């Protein structure tokens, strides 16, 4: 289980503190590792895309693909969303083809621009 302090929601609202499931974890001396499951750290900023089936604890959609890391811009001008390895077709920032390490077309996106794109794709705030 992961607990986040929520700054804002792009869709829906589940309160100021949010708990959700992530596969894997530790219990005593036993550890379960799930390939592709995201890892979280204290004081890390993230955007998460969550799903739920019925009255249950939410879970991260698409494992690590449902988590976008947020970092401070080098010039302290604001927050940037780090790009994932692969964006969905039509996202406008990555051309189809192989992924190249250090590719200059894969730049971090300002958080406000990322939020606007998500809202446009989701059909506006709800």
Image: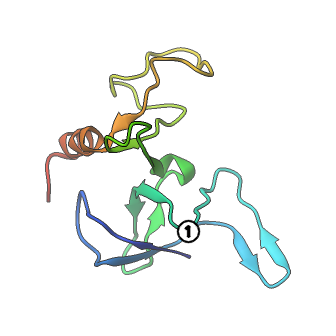
Horizontal placement of 11 versus 92: left or right? left
Residue 42 image-quadrant placement:
bottom right
Q: Which residue is mark 1?
A: 42
The residue at the point 80 percent across, 85 percent down is 28
In the picture as drawn, the residue positioned furthest to the front comes out as 75
Depicted 29 relative to depicted 10: above or below: below
Q: Residues within 10 Å of mark 1 (few under 14, many from 20)?
A: few
Q: Quick one: quadrant of the C terminus?
A: bottom left
Image quarter for residue 14? Answer: bottom left
Residue at 71% x, 52% y is 35
Q: Looking at the picture, how far across and down is residue 83, in whole percent?
A: 46, 35
Tell me where residue 5 appears, x and y as whole percent.
Answer: 39, 73
Left or right of 71: which side holds 121?
left
Instruction: Name, please, the residue furthest toward the right.
Output: 29
Outermost bottom residue:
28
From the top left corner, tell me how far across and down residue 8 is, in percent.
26, 64
* Badge 1 element: loop
Q: Residue at x 71, y 59 (%)?
A: 34
Along the line of sight, the residue nearer the viewer: 94 or 90 = 94
35 sits left or right of 29 in the view: left
């Amino acid at each position: 289980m992961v607990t986040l302090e929520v700054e804002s929601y792009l869709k829906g609202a589940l309160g100021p503190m949010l708990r959700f499931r992530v596969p894997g974890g530790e219990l005593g001396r036993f550890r379960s590792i799930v390939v592709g499951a995201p890892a979280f750290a204290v004081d890390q900023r993230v955007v998460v895309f969550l799903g739920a089936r019925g009255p249950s604890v939410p879970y991260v959609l698409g494992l690590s693909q449902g988590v976008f890391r947020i970092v401070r811009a080098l010039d302290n001008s604001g927050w940037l969303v780090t790009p994932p390895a692969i964006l969905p077709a039509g996202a406008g920032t990555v051309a189809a083809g192989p992924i190249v390490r250090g590719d200059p077309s894969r730049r971090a996106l300002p958080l406000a621009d990322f939020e606007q794109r998500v809202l446009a794709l989701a059909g506006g705030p709800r």
